[in-house]
Amino acid sequence: MISPADHTLAERSELRSLAERLAAEAGAIALAGRRQANDAAGRLGSHIGGDTKSSLTDVVTEFDRAAEAHIVGELRRLRPDDAIVGEEGTDDDGTSGYAWFLDPIDGTTNFVYDQPSWACSIGVALRGEMQAGAVFVPRLNEMFTAALGAGATRDGQPISVSTQTDLSQALVGTGFGYRSETRRQQAVFLTDLITQVRDIRRLGSAAVDLCMVACGRLDAYYERHLNSWDAAAGELIAREAGAITSDFAGAVARPEEMLAAAPGVHNALQTAIRSIGLVD
């Protein structure tokens, strides 16, 4: 007889597999489009239209929409009662209690400039609690996945966070907002923090950053003012790989304040972040 706990784990495993498949398919769509559009300068040229997101530096491409349309079409076919929230405008109410958070190309500027750090991120929550997620990094051909209570993997192999315990030796990732004034303020805070850690990396994708923490390529990551779809899958993957995730005050992680770190440096980094005044 299958216990309720086993049933839950089995369902999360199915959700994980679905998120992985859709992330791989949507990522392939985006990568194929990027290669087709590649001109001699390595940019998207005429394929960039007049649409923007929050500013002129946050471009929207036709490939964002094509990748999201594929994911949405499959979810509507397979799970028509689930809610869907997508970066490119999909906002479907559901009745099942499940909600899917889609970012078809997280790291759009990297995508435009043919930098490798962009990803397709898909996460699913049940009544607000993340159940499963997948982040596919097409240019690296790496698939990160997790299910609640079942650990995290890269290309099917278990992963875990770093064992770093000294903040001064920690490699820390972060991101900047798209608006110039926000970036200026973030840069000011960064000049204080960078003296307290080994170094800073700015990869340009929250989903990729969180997965880098999950597999130990970064010791920690922090950022403010994300959207729900930016971090939905990545936060779960980092947490299931052993990271401590929180906001800057140590409460539950949220898009407005995201901190994910190896257990050995989490508290010290949280203290450092608050000491330089980087709080809401």
Image (tube, helix red, strand yellow):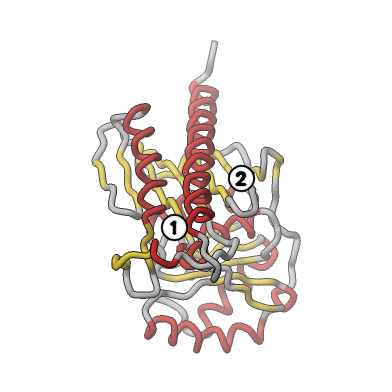
Where residue 263 sits, quadrant-wise, is bottom right
Residue 20 % position (x, y) = 53, 38
Query: Which of marks 2 and 1 precedes in the sequence?
Result: 2
Q: Does 176 sit left or right of 138 as displayed?
A: left
**Where in the figure is residue 181, as x and y percent of width and height?**
37, 85
Residue sitting at x 35%, y 51%? 65
Q: Amino acid at mark 2?
A: Met
Mark 1 → mark 2, Cα distance in angstroms? 16 Å
Q: Is residue 266 above or below residue 273?
A: above
Image mark for residue 230: 1
Q: What kind of residue is marked 1?
A: Asp
- Locate residue 269: give its quadrant: bottom right
Task: Pick the residue in front: 47 or 181.
Answer: 47
Q: Is residue 164 found left or right of 203 in the rendered image?
A: right
Which secondary structure, mark 2?
strand
Q: Nearer the viewer, residue 48 or 255?
A: 48
- For the image, the number of numbered tags is 2
Question: Which numbered marker is on residue 143?
Answer: 2
Around disc 2, counting alpha carbons within 10 Å, would you say few (fewer than 14), some (14 to 19), or many (20 or more)? many
Pinpoint residue 241: horizontal percent, then vertical percent. 64, 49
